[in-house]
Image (tube, rainbow, N blue to C red):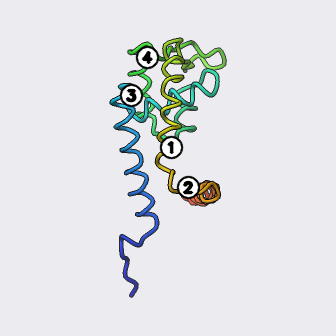
């Protein structure tokens, strides 16, 4: 009989590491900018593109629709995001950054990059490239399992 040792189980270690890194980032964004992680993810995705539906934002950020909806509501209430009619689908709205939202992104993005630099300061450029490559491969492998489950 095989024995599972949780501390050596890679999916568990990946989850623990992800949670720890997310907590560091969440604390920084909350204290500096009053943003929760889901809110920051929406701001970042909207800053990189044009108006998007909540459904598209959920797909891009891998967040469930309730989390996306709550984050969007909070950002709209703070005047960082605006809702506009979706000309291609009257049942949905497009979300876009307001000028205030874009200005906030311009403040947060350098802090995010600095935090990333600090977290990975003990890694060489090659190790970071290798980690990115492995994470991409893990995502593809996990997507394959998701496809099998549906």
Q: Nearer the viewer, mark 4 or mark 3?
A: 3
Give the numbered dot on residue 18: none
User: What is the count of numbered marks?
Assistant: 4
Disc assigned to residue 35: 3
Which of the 4 image quarters holds residue 124? bottom right
Place of residue 82 in the rendered image (x, y in percent of width and height, measured from the top left): 50, 14
Q: Is residue 15 or residue 29 the one in the foreground?
A: 29
On the image, numbered disc 4 is attached to which residue? Answer: 76
Residue located 61% across and 58% down the image: 144
Q: Residue at x 34, y 37 (%)?
A: 27
Q: Secondary structure at mark 1?
A: helix
Front residue of this view, candidates 27 and 120: 120
Q: Which residue position holds label 1?
A: 116
Vertical position of residue 46 compared to residue 90: above or below:
below
Percent across and percent down for residue 37 are: 41, 35
* Whole-number angstrom distance, CA of label 3 to CA of label 1: 17 Å
Q: Report if the CB atoms under discs 3 and 2 are less than 8 Å apart.
A: no
Q: Earlier in the sequence, mark 3 or mark 1?
A: 3
Q: Which residue is at the front of the view, 44 or 59?
A: 44
Name the secondary structure under disc 3. Answer: loop
User: Which residue, given by chain and number where applicable, does mark 2 sit on?
Assistant: 146
Which of the 4 quarters of the picture holds residue 67? Answer: top left
């Amino acid at each position: 009989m095989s024995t599972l040792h949780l501390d050596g189980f890679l999916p568990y270690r990946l989850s623990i590491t992800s949670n720890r890194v997310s907590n560091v980032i969440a604390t920084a964004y909350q204290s500096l900018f009053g943003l929760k992680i889901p809110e920051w993810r929406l701001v970042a995705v909207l800053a990189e593109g044009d108006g998007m539906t909540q459904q598209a934002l959920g797909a891009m950020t891998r967040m469930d629709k309730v989390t996306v909806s709550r984050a969007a509501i909070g950002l709209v209430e703070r005047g960082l995001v605006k809702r506009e009619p979706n000309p291609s689908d009257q049942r949905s709205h497009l979300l876009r950054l307001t000028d205030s939202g874009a200005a906030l992104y311009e403040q947060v993005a350098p802090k995010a990059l600095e935090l990333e630099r600090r977290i990975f300061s003990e890694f060489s450029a090659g190790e970071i490239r290798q980690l990115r490559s492995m994470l991409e491969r893990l995502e593809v492998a996990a997507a394959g399992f998701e496809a099998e489950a549906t």
